[in-house]
Amino acid sequence: MESLLGDYYTAISIIIVYHLFSVQHWLDRVTDLDTDAESVRRSTAIGDLARERVRLQCVKFQKVFPWIQIALLFFAISALIYLAIRVALHLAHIPYLYSIELVIVLWLVFVVSTVGVWFKGR
């Protein structure tokens, strides 16, 4: 049973790392677009078409945030956490500090990092 719980923790950690790399890639693209927007703002007049193109790209990248991926990963991580908690409740000799609270911390890392990156990208 302990190895099953360890496998759950490993799976949750791998999913979170993959998710963080994916969201970081989105944030890098948004940052590049922000740099381009600042460059266009400084080098063009107010009614220029380049400004409109950059504005449309900004709107597009806000809509491209990987919501479907986040929803699927949120479901997968929540299911793994549920299974880890169920297994941990059957292991009487392992304290809750080392079983249930760890998966809750991992779940909170997933949620907080997703929300933080989304706000930073906006």
Image (tube, rainbow, N blue to C red):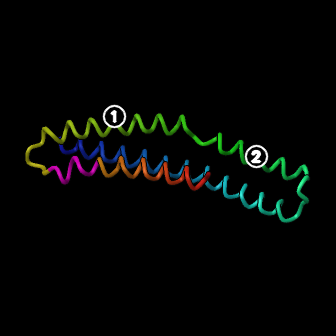
Seen at 52% across and 37% down, the residue is 69
Q: Which residue is mark 1?
A: 79
* Residue 83: % across, % down: 26, 35
Q: Judge left or right: residue 99 versus residue 25.
A: left
Question: Tag 2, which secondary structure?
Answer: helix
Please tell me whether mark 2 or mark 1 is closer to you in this view: 2
Quadrant containing the N terminus in the rendered view:
top left
Magenta segment includes 100 = yes
Circle 1: is it few (<14), some (14-19), or many (20+) Cα within 10 Å? few
Q: Farthest residue toward the front? A: 46
Q: Judge left or right: residue 109 versus residue 3.
A: right
Seen at 90% across and 49% down, the residue is 49
Q: Which residue is mark 2?
A: 57
* Residue 89: % across, % down: 15, 39
Magenta segment includes 52 = no
Circle 2: is it few (<14), some (14-19), or many (20+) Cα within 10 Å? some
- 36 to 76, vertically: above or below: below
Q: Judge left or right: residue 73 versus residue 3.
A: right
The stretch of residues the image draws in magenta is: 96-103
Seen at 60% across and 42% down, the residue is 65
